[in-house]
C-alpha cells in the first residue's frame, strides 16, 4: 500500500537521518525507491589511529557535522524547507547510544517544528531495504525510475553481514521477518577488523583484507569454517552441474543457521604464532597476503554455504545480501556464481549503499509506514490518520502557533534493538 502525498510533489518524500555509528548521514528518498539526495560524512580518518570506532569521538563528531550534512541533503534534493517534505525518519537503534542520540534529537526537533510525522527505523531494517533502492540519484529522473533491484516476490532470504551483525532473516513480506540465525559471538565485519589488526594491514579491516588477499594464495593455509561440515549443496541442480561454491554445509541441529567467527580469528592468531616459532615472519607482505586470502575465503565459504542452505530449505524466491561486508568482492562473486547456477535471483546493493547511509533508512521508513497503514483495521481509520496528518501540515505559512507536542517526542534510542522481537517470531 502506498502512502498518500499531501505536498506539492507527486512523490512521497522522506528526510532520513542516520547516526548509528561513525557515519553522519542524511538523505531525501521518494516513494521508498528513489534517491533524491544522499550525503555521508565519514569519520574513518578520525578512528584509524584507534584501530576501531571510539564511541565518544564518534558522538562528538556527529554533533559537529550533522547540521551541514542535513542542509546539504535538502539542498541536493532541491528542498527549500523541511515542511515541503512528507515525513522525517531516523535510526533509533541498534548502534552506539551516544551517536544515536545526536540523530534522534535532531529528528525530533525537526518533526516538532515542522509538524511532520517522525518514523523511527531499525538500522538492520534499513540495510535490508538498501536492496529496494534505485541507484540513480538524479532528481530529474525520479519519474522515469521503475524501482531498485529487489522484487516484490516473497519469501526472500536476507543475509545481513556487517561490522556489528551477521544474521540470516526470512522476509515473508514487507516488514515481516523471521530470524533464522545470527552470530553467537563476533560478527563477520568485526572479525575482518581484528584480523587486519593482527596482520598490521590497517583500518577499516574489510577493504584492507580484500586488498591484501588479491596478491595471496588462499590455499596455502587451512583455516576452519566454524559451524559447518564438509560438502556441497547440490539438491537444486543435477550433480554434474554442481557449483564449486560453497565448499561447506552447515552443521545440523540448533546452530544450522547460526554463525561464529571468534574461533576463526583465534585460528589466525595461532597460525601466526606457529609461523613465528618456525622462524617465519607472519607479517611479511607475502605471508600476510596468504593469511588474508585464507581468512577471507573461510568467511565467504561460511556465509555463502549457510545462505545457500537456508535458501534451499525455505524455498525462497530471491536472496538479498546487505550490510558493510556485502561490499566484499569475493563474497559477491561467490554468491553470484552459486545462485546463478541454481537459478535463484540474487540482489546486492551498489557499493555506496552497502555501508551505513541514510538513503536506506528513508526506504525502510516508507515501507514501514505503508505497512502500518495497511494494518489499520479499516479504510476509515486510515482516512482519519491521513486527515490528521494533513491538518497538521496544512497551510504552513498561515500557522500562528507552534505544533502541539506529540508522542514521538518520547522516542528513545536503543543500543541493542533486535530486528525481530520475541513476540513476532
Image (tube, helix red, strand yellow):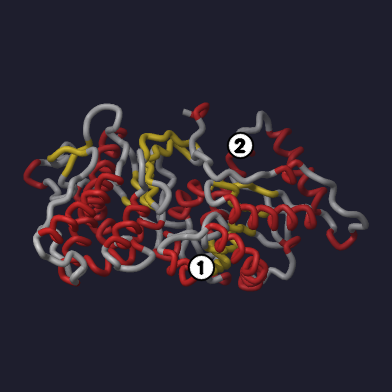
Taking depth in this image into account, of 347 and 109 the one nearest to the observer is 109
Question: Is there any visible trace of residue 145 in the rendered image?
Answer: yes
| Cα–Cα gap, marks 1 and 2 | 39 Å
Q: Do the residues labelled 1 and 2 touch (CB within 8 Å)?
A: no
**Dot 1 corresponds to which residue?**
43
Question: Could you classify mark 1 by the number of other residues whose Cα lies within 10 Å: few (under 14), some (14-19), or many (20 or more)?
Answer: some
Please tell me how crowded label 2 is: few (under 14), some (14-19), or many (20+) other residues with Cα within 10 Å.
Answer: some
- Asked which secondary structure carries label 1, the reply is loop
Tell me which residue sits at (33%, 38%) in the image: 316
User: Which of the two labelled residues, at mark 1 and mark 2, occupies the earlier sequence position?
Assistant: 1
Measuring from the top left, give residue 421's x and y in whole percent: 51, 32
x then y, percent, for residue 422: 49, 28
Q: Given this view, does label 1 or label 2 mark the residue nearer the observer?
A: 1
Q: Mark 2 points at which residue?
A: 374
Q: Nearer the viewer, residue 276 or 81?
A: 276
- Who is closer to the viewer here, 366 or 249? 249
Vertical side of 256 occupied by 16: above or below: below
Task: Report the front residue among 352 and 294.
Answer: 294
Left or right of 148, for residue 64:
right
The picture places residue 92, in percent across and down from the top left corner, at: 60, 48
Residue 86 visible in image: no
Residue 317's spot in the image, x, y percent?
Answer: 34, 41
Quadrant of image for the N terminus: top right
Amino acid at each position: 500500500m502506498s502512502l498518500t502525498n499531501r505536498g506539492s510533489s507527486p512523490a512521497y518524500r522522506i528526510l532520513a537521518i542516520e547516526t548509528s555509528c561513525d557515519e553522519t548521514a542524511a538523505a531525501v528518498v521518494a516513494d521508498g525507491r528513489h534517491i533524491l539526495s544522499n550525503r555521508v560524512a565519514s569519520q574513518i580518518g578520525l578512528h584509524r589511529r584507534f584501530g576501531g570506532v571510539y564511541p565518544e569521538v564518534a558522538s562528538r563528531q556527529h554533533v559537529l557535522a550533522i547540521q551541514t550534512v542535513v542542509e546539504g541533503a535538502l539542498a541536493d534534493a532541491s528542498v527549500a524547507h523541511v515542511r515541503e517534505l512528507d515525513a522525517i525518519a531516523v535510526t533509533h537503534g541498534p548502534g552506539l547510544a551516544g551517536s544515536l542520540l545526536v540523530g534522534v534529537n535532531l529528528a525530533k526537533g525537526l518533526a516538532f517544528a515542522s509538524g511532520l510525522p517522525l518514523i523511527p527505523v531499525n538500522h538492520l531494517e534499513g540495510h535490508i531495504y538498501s536492496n529496494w533502492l534505485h541507484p540513480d540519484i538524479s532528481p530529474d529522473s525520479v519519474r522515469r525510475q521503475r524501482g531498485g533491484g529487489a522484487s516484490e516476490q516473497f519469501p526472500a532470504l536476507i543475509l545481513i553481514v556487517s561490522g556489528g551483525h551477521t544474521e540470516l532473516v526470512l522476509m515473508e513480506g514487507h516488514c515481516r521477518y523471521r530470524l533464522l540465525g545470527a552470530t553467537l559471538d563476533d560478527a563477520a565485519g568485526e572479525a575482518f577488523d581484528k584480523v587486519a589488526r593482527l596482520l598490521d594491514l590497517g583500518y577499516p579491516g574489510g577493504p584492507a583484507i580484500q586488498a591484501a588477499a588479491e596478491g595471496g594464495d588462499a590455499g596455502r593455509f587451512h583455516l576452519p569454517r566454524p559451524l559447518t561440515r564438509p560438502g556441497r549443496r547440490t539438491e537444486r541442480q543435477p550433480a554434474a552441474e554442481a557449483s564449486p561454491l560453497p565448499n561447506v554445509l552447515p552443521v545440523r541441529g540448533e546452530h544450522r543457521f547460526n554463525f561464529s567467527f571468534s574461533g576463526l580469528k583465534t585460528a589466525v592468531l595461532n597460525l601466526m604464532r606457529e609461523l613465528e616459532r618456525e622462524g617465519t615472519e607472519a607479517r611479511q607482505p607475502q605471508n600476510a597476503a596468504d593469511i588474508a586470502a585464507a581468512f577471507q575465503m573461510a568467511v565467504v565459504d561460511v556465509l555463502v554455504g549457510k545462505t545457500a542452505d537456508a535458501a534451499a530449505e525455505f524455498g525462497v524466491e530471491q536472496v538479498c545480501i546487505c550490510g558493510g561486508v556485502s561490499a566484499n568482492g569475493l563474497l559477491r562473486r561467490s554468491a553470484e556464481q552459486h545462485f546463478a547456477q541454481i537459478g535463484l535471483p540474487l540482489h546486492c546493493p551498489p557499493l555506496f549503499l552497502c555501508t551505513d547511509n541514510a538513503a536506506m533508512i528513508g526506504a525502510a521508513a516508507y515501507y514501514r509506514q505503508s505497512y502500518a497503514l495497511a494494518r489499520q483495521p479499516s479504510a476509515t481509520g486510515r482516512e482519519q490518520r491521513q486527515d490528521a496528518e494533513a491538518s497538521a501540515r496544512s497551510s504552513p505559512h498561515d500557522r500562528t502557533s507552534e505544533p502541539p507536542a506529540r508522542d514521538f517526542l518520547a522516542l528513545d534510542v536503543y543500543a541493542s534493538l533486535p530486528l525481530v522481537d520475541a513476540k513476532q517470531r
